[in-house]
Structures are given as structure tokens and as C-alpha cells.
Amino acid sequence: IDEDFAIYYRKFIKAYDMRPVAFDVYRRSSDRFSNNDRTIDNCTILESLFVPPGERSKKSFILYGLNILKFSTDEIKSIEDLIEYRNTIIHADREKQLKLLSESKYMYKWFEDTFKLIRKILYKYVESPWN
């Protein structure tokens, strides 16, 4: 094992101890095939990292946290769109689901790029975990 991995692993253990739900859901999500399931999982990860316990206003905490971590405007917009997509699924808004799915943005590449962004967020959290 090289030294870089050993350093990363020590940081990962600390981050995992602070937010195990985020890492466990991420691991489980990587085995899913449905974009809807992965979207819900990835929003759960974001909520685990950014939203204080008992808080109902999740979206604003997530977006504010990404802004503090200096993610780009485009990256923050992608996460905002992911949250909107997740809310449409969870609240079973059929009309909105059909509208979203008819948009050219919500194609395979967009989902994959957004899921890679979740990985980037988790990696940044490992490098600098917060409570």
C-alpha cells in the first residue's frame, strides 16, 4: 500500500465515523441500475452530509454547503436539479415527472455526470470533514 493511500484511508475512517450513512448509501447505490433509485440514494447522501438533524428545509442547506465548499455554479445547479428530480419522484407528481423526463437534459450522461459529482463531494468531505 502506498503512502498516499494510507493517508487517504486514515482520513476516510475519520469521515466515515462522522457520517456513516452517507458512505454506506453511496456504496449500496453504486450497485443500482435505476436512475430513480440512484437519485434518491444520492440525495440521501447529500442530506446526511449537509442537513442538521430534524431540519425540514434540506435543499437550502445542501446548496449553501456546496457554495461554502466552493463548488462551481454549474455543479451547484446540477445538484439543485437532482434534488428537484428526486422530489418529483418521492412526491409522485406524475405531471411533473413526465415534463422532466421529456427534457433532453435528463439523459444517461446527465445522471452519470451528476453521480460522479456526488463522488467528488464525498471525496472533498473525506479531505476536510466537518461536524
Image: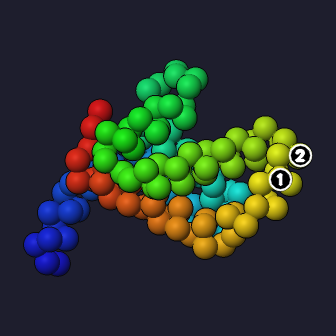
Residue 27 appearing in the image: no
Q: Which residue is drawn at 36% across and 51% down?
A: 71
Residue under numbered circle 2: 95
Looking at the rendered structure, the secondary structure element under dot 2 is helix
The quarter of the picture where the N terminus appears is bottom left
116 to 61, vertically: above or below: below
- Give coordinates of residue 96: x percent, y percent: 82, 46
Residue placed most toward the observer, 48 or 100:
100
Residue under numbered circle 1: 99
Residue placed most toward the observer, 112 or 75:
75
Residue placed most toward the observer, 81 or 18:
81
Residue 55 appearing in the image: yes
Kind of residue sitting beneath label 2: Glu
- Give coordinates of residue 41: x percent, y percent: 59, 52
Compute the Cα span from label 1 to label 2: 6 Å
Kind of residue sitting beneath label 1: Lys
Report the disc number at residue 20.
none
Discs 1, 2 touching: Cβ within 8 Å: yes
